[in-house]
Amino acid sequence: MPVKVSVIIPVYNPGPYIEDCVGSMLRQSLPPDEFEVIFVDDGSTDDTPARLDELAAEHAHIQVVHQENSGWSGKPRNVGIDTSKGEFVMFVDNDDYLGDEALERMYDYGVANEADVVVGKMAGKGRGVPVELFRVNRPHANVENAPLIDSLTPHKMVRRAFLERTGLRFPEGRRRLEDHVFVTEAYLRADNVSVLSDYVCYYHIRRDDGSNAGFQRFDPVGYFKNLREALDVVERYTEPGPLRDRLFRRWLRVEMVERLSGRRMRTIPDEYRRELYDEIRGVVLERFGPGVDAGLRPAQRIVAALVRADRYDDLLAFAERQAAIAPAARPTGVAWAGEAVRVTFDVEYLHADTPLTFSEHAKAPDGTPEDLEGANAWLDADAVARFGQATADLLVRERSTSAQYFQPVTVERETVPSGEDGRVRLVLHVTADIDPATAAGGAPLGAGLWDTYVRVGLGSWTKDCRLGPDAGPDRPEPHAGVVGGRVVLPYWTNEHHNFSLDVDRAGKRLGIAAVAPEDIRGDGPVLRVPLPLHVAAATPVELRLTGPGVPPVDVPATLSPGDGTGEGAAGRATLTAELPLERLKGATWRASVCLVPDAPGRRRHALTPALRVTASGVRAVRPPAPAAGGPQRPGLARRVVRKLRRTLRSALGR
């Protein structure tokens, strides 16, 4: 088969962190004869070279290139390009990994949209990744119609014919930002770029030991020299004007203003902070005209202006105030609405844990404020003037991988008098629906713990926070739901009392075992059991009956929604099953429920009451209590004795 994708992985002393990367290559849904993996070992001194050689000997689609250490990732990637045979090449770092369907989905998406570059959705585990870029799929993207410039890491799929046609390669040698130079040129020269956002393709991982190259302190002189090379690429392929200014603004905002803002600015050691400041100021004065600053938000423009004016002390003071500003999202309701979890919450920004207030009468300055009082007045005026465009998004994020997805929301905005003269609070009232069947970019939520985050855009700030803490003793606690082939438990985390979802993981917390015998009803062969569960419609489940010395009996059953009348109370479901009395009569049976019978690795949840079956019907009884002073688990004493005997025999060599 022709090779569709060549995966190029530069390798240098990854230690055990390479195993997740290797595992993801072996799990790809693309058949092994349709892709190749090229590990380029850049002179590793640990056990990795031998590990890779063993891997290549076992798998025909994996190969290893060994070379002397080049000092950085540029040359290994170029060697991989020259070695590759695929229609596309995919760049992966040795401590990251791919989603299991990443290569197949990205390749098909690139072919369908005739893309030269395919950008797959990223999840950052301890690392920042673009958020707005992956809000929706973008089959035909470019630097003018999409925030592509926010994603400059090399982890893209690129058409090899495009690389050959343009001669595009990574800068080599020990240096920084080689990926910025390569990716920026690729964006600007590609006929089409496609952004795939409905599946997490790339998992960007921060090592537990913090040894990723991107987290090491850098030499400011060398770093900003390399940054200028990325700016050179923009100048080479764009004309002076709004587009060039907008692209330049990415480096001013991310690499300069954000380093000198808020908590990030305050936590840098002073001597190193001065080095950064001096180099940043040099680039700002040398390369960025007024049109670059003009598109920044007011807080960012203030930082840029203070840098231009060489007001270092004022920059520190401004950063200290900004560091204390953060959003808070307070839940006001959680309930099931059909097959979705409906969450309502209020959002506003706080300053030092106190609601941030704004002057309704503040006016934006004609130019850059001359002092910090004027700067703060500008922020007030901007937030109030643009409050009608303020946003709050709800995202669900899987705890183990950090894969996250936007959920549909509606937002109402309220200006609340603060009790001070002419000052107000700006509050957002949000309603969000989390449908487990579609919440993962149109796909069902996978099994795991899903935390909720709120992304708040107001005035100069766009920041994230957890949804919570809860509203105290009266907090809403809906039952678990059986919806969309999933068992979903809305719950509050133990430590910080934030809102999360447990998908297909909860057991005892479902409360099924707490059903009392008097709640269970038998009407001839028909058994009815009220369960603390939500279902939106009649849902098939399975009841398993287990008796002494006989095979278990599985009985089809149905969960029906309660409506506050008749069989079940609102918010509670009723399990109904017709039992084969002739087969079961004359014995007492223990019962368990499988809530998703079609799921692999089916889970069963035990009912505490036992079921006594006669020829005329069934009734619930309390299970027999263990004998006083006897073992709590049948046979436990015998198992302990047998284990002790085995241990003694082993010790005696018998």
Image: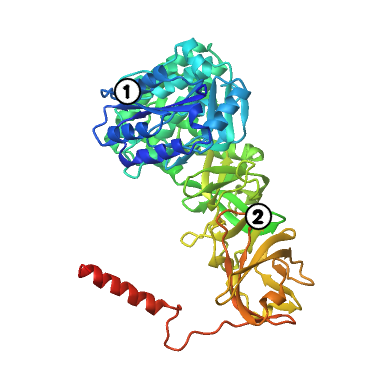
**Amino acid type at mark 2:** Val
The image quadrant that residue 26 belongs to is: top left
- Residue that carries the numbered disc 1 in the rendered image: 175
Name the residue located 55 percent from the left edge and 19 percent from the top edge: 116
Residue 59 visible in rendering: yes
- The number of numbered discs placed on residues in the rendered structure image is 2
The image quadrant that residue 344 belongs to is: bottom right
Identify whether 147 is placed above or below 551: above
Q: In the image, residue 628 lies at what x, y percent?
A: 45, 89
- Residue that carries the numbered disc 2 in the rendered image: 341
Q: In the image, residue 56 lies at what x, y percent?
A: 36, 31
Name the residue located 65 percent from the left edge and 59 percent from the top edge: 482
Quarter of the picture containing the C terminus is bottom left
Q: Residues within 10 Å of mark 1 (few under 14, many from 20)?
A: some
Tell me the CA gap for discs 1 and 2: 49 Å
Local secondary structure at mark 1: loop
Q: Residues within 10 Å of mark 2 (few under 14, many from 20)?
A: many
Name the residue located 47 percent from the left edge and 49 percent from the top edge: 400
Residue 29: numbered disc: none
Q: Residue furthest front?
A: 654
| 382 sits left or right of 342 in the view | left
Q: In the image, residue 489 lies at what x, y percent?
A: 59, 59
Give whichever of discs 1 and 2 has the lower sequence position. 1
**Amino acid type at mark 1:** Arg
Asked if the residues shown at circle 1 and circle 2 are in contact, with their CB atoms under 8 angstroms apart, the answer is: no
Taking depth in this image into account, of 67 and 299 the one nearest to the observer is 67
Identify whether 189 is placed above or below 370: above
